Amino acid sequence: MKKILLVSVLLLILLTSLSAQTGREIMQNVIDAQKVNSSAMDIQMTLVDNDGDTSTRRIQTLILNDNDLTKTITLFLEPASVRNTRFLTVENDGRADDQWIFLPSLRKVKRIAAGEKDGSFMGSDFSYSDMGSSGSSVEDSTQTVLREEKYNGRNSFVVESIPNAGTDNNYGKYITWVDKSSWLTLKVEFYSKDGKTQIKELNSENIVKENSHWVAKKITMETLESGHKTILEIKQVKYDIPLNPGYFTTTFLETGRAK
Amino acid sequence: MITILAAFQIPKIHVDSSTEIFIPQDHEISKIDREIEEEFGAMDSIIMGVKVNFGTVLEPEVLSIIDLITKALENSDNIKSVMSITNMDYLNGTTEGMEVIPILEDMSPGSIKEFKKRLVDWNDVYEGTFISADSNLCAIIVQPISGYNELTNKAVYEQIKELAAEYESSNLSFPIAGLPVVTEEISRSIMSDLYWLIPAAAGLILGILFLSFRKLEGVLFPLLGLAVGVVWVMGIIGFLNITFTMATLLVPVLLLVVGSAYGIHVMSHFYEGISQKTGFLDYENVSSVIGKSLKTTVTPVILAGLTTAGGFLSLVSSPLGPFRIFGILSAVGVICSQLASLVLIPSLLRLRYSKGIDTEKYHKIKDKEERNKASVIFIILEKIVRRRKWIVLLISIALITETIVLIPKITVGTDTVKFFTPNSSVVKDITIFNENLSGTNFLSVMISAPEPGDILDPKFLSYLEKFENYIEKENANVKKVQTVVASIKRINKLMNQDTIPYFIPNLEDESVSLDFFSADGSFGNDSWSLEEGESDSLAEKDSPEAKEGLLSYSELSEMLLESHLSSGNNISIEEFISSFLSLENFQGESFNEIPLVPEKYGFTTQEELKNLITQYLVLYSGNLDMIINDSLEPDKTLITIQLADISQKNQKILMNNIDSFWNNYLPLGWSYEIGGGATMQYVLSNLVTRSQIISLISALLVVWIIVSAMFRSPLAGLIGLVPVFFALAGIFLFMILFQFNLDIITSLLASLAIGIGVDYSIHIMNAYKRNIAKGNADCLNKVYRTTGKAVFINAVSVAVGFLSLTISEFVPIRQMGVLFAVSMIFACLASLIVLPIILNKLKPRFLGVTL
C-alpha cells in the first residue's frame, strides 16, 4: 500500500513538473525550433475560393540569419505576369524593416514601405504578418496552457496567447496546438480583436524532418467568413546551406546575379 | 381554447423590415447581389458622419475624436472593417520608390499638416466618399460582418449611436445613414406601429359601435369577435413562422376594420328583432330572436365576406411574395372574423340574456329621431338620382376618363427613405450626406472577363476610366464612380517619377529568368559555398535622372503654350495644371494615367503593359479586395456608383447609359451585371407596377365572377363593378393630386378596395332584387331607408377605421389610410347614386322580370 502511494506521489510530481512547462516556454520552443542559419524554399500556394475555383502562385525564398537579424529574398515564379518580380526584406534592430522590390517590367528597383501588416500576401489567406516569422516574440503576448491533448495522432499542448495591450497585433487571441516532439504548430485558431470570434484557422500536415529540421510541408489557412482558403505546399526545402550574401543586395534584385 | 393557443404563437412572430424580402429569391437581381457579395463581401455599410458647425473636421481636436471613434469601432465586435480619414492608406511617392503609409501618422502638428496635403493630393479618392469638399463633414464607413445580418446590424448601429451620444457637443453632430440603418429604423417603426395602430383602430371602431348601439354588449361583443379573429390570424403567422413584413403589418388593422361590419350586422339585426317584440322575453324567446336574426344575416354576411376574401385572395397573382402572403392571410382573416361574428356573438348574447330581456328598453323615440335625421341625406340622394341622372352620368364618365388619362402620371418608386417623414432623423441625416458627400445610395456594376488577369488589360482599364467620366457627366444623380482605375493610375505615377517617356531600354541589361531550384545549378545540388564580402548598395539606375533645376522664362512660356494647345480650350484649372506638369513628368505627372501606349514605357506589346500593371498589384493588392476578385489575376471587377437620388426616372436613364456603354465596349466573352441597393429598389419598383396591374385585373375578374354567379348574369357582374371603378378612380386621383408614390404599400390598396367596395353593390343590388320580388318595382326609397342606410354606415365606419392608419410612423401607410377612406366614400356614393341610375335605366333582367 505504501509502495503504491509512493509511486503515485512520484508520478504526480513528475506530471506536475512536465505540465509546469509554461505557455511562454512552449511558445519560445516553437520560435527556437524554426531558427535556422539559412534556408531555401520552393513554395507553391494554391488559392481556393468557396466555389472550389483555384489559382496558383509559386515563389521561392532565401533566408539568411545574420546576427539574429534575418534577410529574405522572395522570388516570384507564377503567375507568369509577375515572373521575376523580386522582393528583399532586411530586418533591422529597433526600427522598421527595409524593403525593396524589383519589378521586371519597370526594370527598376524601388524601395517600398508597406504600412499595413494585415494586408493579404499575394491575395492569399495569409497576411504579410502571418508570413513573416521574424519579429515574433513571446514578450509581446501572455500565454496560458489550456490543456494537453492528442491532435491528429500527435501529443500536443494547447496554448492560448493574448497579445499584450499596446502591442500592434491584427488578432485579439490565438489558440495554438503545439506538437510536443517537433515543436511545430499543428493548428492555430486566429480570433478577432475582441477575442470572441474566430476569423481564420491554420492546419499543418506532412510533418517531416529535412536536414535535421522538422518542417510541415503542407499548411492550409482558411478564412472562415468567406470560406476562402490557401494551401501552402513546400515543394523543396534546404536548411543551413551556405548562401552567398550577394543574394541579399539590391544589386542582385536588379540584375538577378549575385556577384 | 383555439384563441389561447393562437395567442401563445404570437411572440414567435419574426419581423423582417428589409425591402429585399419583397423580391423573389430566384429573381435575377437577388442572384447578382449574392454573387457580388461572394466575390467582394457585403455591400451594405453603415455610414457615421462627423459634422462640425464651425471650422472644419481637420482641426486637431475633431481629428482626435474621429480617430478615437475609428479605433473604438475597429476594436469592437461584429465589425469587419472601418474606414475614415484618420485610418486610410496613402500611397506616397519617395525619392527611391513608394510607400503605403497611414494618411495620418499621429496627432503632431507636423503630421496634421502633412495629412492635409495628402488629402488634397489624392482627393479623387478621398473627397466625396470620406470628406466633403468644404471639410465640414467626414464619413466613417463601417462594414458589419456579414452572415448574421439583422442582429449584427442592430448591435453595430446601437454602438455607433452610443459613440455619437458620447462625443456630441454644440459644435459636433453625428448623422448616421446607410441601408442597415434604414432597415433597422423600419423594424423599430413596425414594432411601434403594431403597438399603436391596433389599439387606435380598435378605439375608433369602439366609438363607432358605441354610436350605433349605445349599449355595453353592443360594443363589447363585436369587439370580442374581432379580437378573436385577429388573434387567430396572428397565431397562424407565428405558428407557420411567416415573416412579418411591412405588408403583414396591415393585416390586423384591416381585419379589425373590415370585420367590424360583420359584427355590426349581427348585432343590429338582433336589436331590430328585439325592438319588434313587446314585454319581457324569457330565455327561450330571446334564443328564438337570436336564431331568426342570425338566419337573415348569415347569407349577406357570408356573401360579402366571400367577395372581400376573393378580392384579397387575388393578390396571390402578384409577383411579390409578401403580397401573396398578405392576400392569403387577410382572406383567411376575413373568414375567421366572419366565423367569430356568426358563432361567437350569438353565443355571447345567449349567455348575456340567459335570464331573459325587457324589450321596453329597446323602444326608444330617440332612434326614430335619428332615423329622420339620416333620411334627409337620402331625400337629397333620391332627388339627384331621379332628376339629375344625365349630369351624374356625365360627371361619372368625365371622372373615369380623367383618371385613365392621368394614371401614367402616378410616380412609381419604393424609396425606403421616403417611408419616413421629412422631419424624422433618418431623412434629415440622409439629406446631410446627400448634400455634402456623394450620397448614400449605391449601385454596383460587376464586370466579368473570360480569362484570369484580363481585368488588368490596359485597353479594358482605359474603357473603365472612360466609363467613369461618361457616367458622371451624363447622369445628374450620379455623384461619384469608384473603380480600380484611381489606384492603378496612382501607382503608375509614383513608380515612374524617374522614368523618361519613350526611353528605349538597353535590352542586354534585361535580367535573366531566375529559378533557385532549377537543374542548372543553385539548390539542385549542394555545390554552394558561402562567399564573403558583398557590399549591399543600391544599384545605379538604368535610366537617366529626371531633369532638374530652374526653367528659363522662355522654356516656361513654351511649356505653357504647348500644354494649352495639347489640352484644348474647355478644361478646368486642375486639368491645365496637370497637363502642364506632365510635360516635364513633374513628380511622375505624365504617368498619372492607365498605361496604354507600349512605346512610352519602352515596350512593344500590350501584354507587357498588362504585366507591368499586374506587378504593381504585388505592391498594393491586399487593399483592393473590395474592387478586384483576385490580387494578381482578377477576372472580375466591381464598379461602385454613388447616387444622390434614386427616382425611377433617373435610375432608368442611368441603367440605359450603363447598358449602352458596356454593350458597345465589352468584347465577346466579357459580361456585366448590375446590382446593389439602388438597383434592388429599381427592380422592386418595376415589380410593384407589374404586381399592381396583375392584381388589379385578377381582383376585378374574381369579383366579376362572384357577382355574376350570385345573380346568374354576367351583366350583373359588370354593373356590380361600377362602384368599384369609382373607388379606384378615387384612389388614383388622390395619388396624383397629393403626389403619393405607388410603392410596396399603396399598391396593395387597389385589390383591397375592389374586394371591400363591391360589397356595397351587392347589398344594393340584392335589396333591389328583394323588393322587386315583393312586387315593389319603384323601390328606390325603400332601398335607401333600409339597405342604403346600412351601406352608408358601413362605409363611414370602414373609412373612419382606416383613418387610424394615419397615425402610423410610415408615410405610405398613412397615405394608405387616407386613400382607403377616400375609396370607401367613392364606392359608397357610387353605389347609392350611380348604381341606382344605371339599374333604373337598364332595368336588367337579373333583378326580376317585372321591372
Image (cartoon, rainbow, N blue to C red):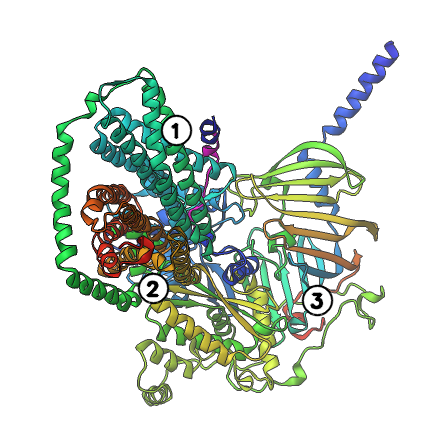
Residue found at x 81% / y 40%: A153
Mark 2 lies on residue = B647
Of mark 1 and mark 2, the one earlier in the sequence is 1
Relative to B287, residue B621 above or below: below
Gap between marks 1 and 2, in whole Å? 50 Å
Image location of residue B579, percent across then percent down: 38, 81
Question: B542 or B652: nearer the eye?
Answer: B652
Image location of residue B456, percent across then percent down: 56, 73
Image location of residue A206, percent across then percent down: 80, 50
Label 3 Cα neighbours within 10 Å, binned few <14 / some 14-19 / many ≥20: many
Quadrant of the drawing holding the C terminus of chain B: bottom left
Whether residue B454 is visible to the viewer of this picture, yes or no, is yes
Question: A30 or B396: nearer the eye?
Answer: B396
- Callout 3: SS: helix
The mark lying in front, picked from 1 and 2, is 1
Residue A129 is tagged as none
Amino acid identity at mark 3: Tyr
Relative to B613, residue B82 above or below: above
Amino acid identity at mark 2: Ser
Relative to B530, residue A207 above or below: above
Residue found at x 47% / y 42%: B151
Query: Is B324 displayed left or right of B576 in the figure?
Result: right
Residue found at x 72% / y 56%: A232
Mark 1 lies on residue = B344
Mark 3 lies on residue = A247
Label 2 Cα neighbours within 10 Å, binned few <14 / some 14-19 / many ≥20: some
Question: A81 or B49: nearer the eye?
Answer: B49
Task: Count how many numbered circles sit on residues in the image.
Answer: 3
Amino acid identity at mark 1: Leu
